[in-house]
Image: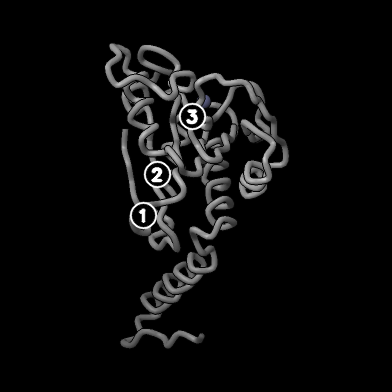
Amino acid sequence: MQVIEKGGANPDLVVVGSVHGDEPSGKKAVERLQNKYHKFQKPVKFIVANEKALSQGTRYVDKDLNSSFPGDPKSDEHEERLAHKISKHVEGKTVLDLHSTRSTDKPFANIKDLSQESKNLVRSTGVENSTCFEEESGVLIEMGSPGVLVETGPQGTEQAAEKSLNILENFLACEGYIDRDATEAIQTSSDTLKQFMATGSSRPPTTAK
Ligand SMILES: [Zn+2]
């Protein structure tokens, strides 16, 4: 498990990727977001969940992590112990859980109740379709208050990785964690710098604001 904290202590939101080891898109989206955004408006935590299964290229090591919550720290099974560790990070927090799927290439969201809070999370993902499964099944989003799972695209594809990043950006921007305009500003200034280097001018161009 890899834990990345941004924007300060005590985050209200935890973003989790690669709960399933055969879904590298979650890990990639978390990593690409870190490369793209360096400033966060509010504290947020990112977790790359099942690194052991990822490194083995398998869905899980001993059992499905997304039916193991809240987990058991004394279990012989890797995913039971991991679920317990992740539970400690997400208790009382909002959870965004990024997955990819074999069933459809259309992104969809999954929530555990029809509260306004849960519906708002779906809206922040920007995903059009959603389902609600209210029965307890040991999934991660049951630990969130509230939580949303998003199936972002076909398992193991670049499409799923890019869509995961896109959904993650949508979500963080809607919920006020990142400022998308700030990224554009960084982009513009690096373009200006490239122009400056290309022209060989001895002075950097003044930036019009
Ligand atoms: Zn999954």
Residue of label 1:
6
Callout 1: helix, strand or loop? Answer: strand
Residue of label 3:
140
Callout 2: helix, strand or loop? Answer: strand
Choose mark 3 or mark 2, whichever is in front. 3
Say if mark 3 contacts mark 1, CB within 8 Å: no
Residue 83, quarter of picture: top left
Say if mark 2 contacts mark 1, CB within 8 Å: yes
Q: Residue at x 57, y 37 (%)?
A: 148
Residue of label 2:
46
Residue 78 location, x and y as percent?
32, 17
> Could you tell me which quadrant the N terminus lies in?
top left
Residue nearest the viewer, comparing 71 with 20 = 71
Rounded to the nearest whole Å, what is the CA distance between mark 3 and mark 2? Answer: 14 Å
**Which of the two discs, 2 and 1, labels the residue nearer the N terminus?**
1
Residue at the limit of the structure toward the right, as seen here:
128
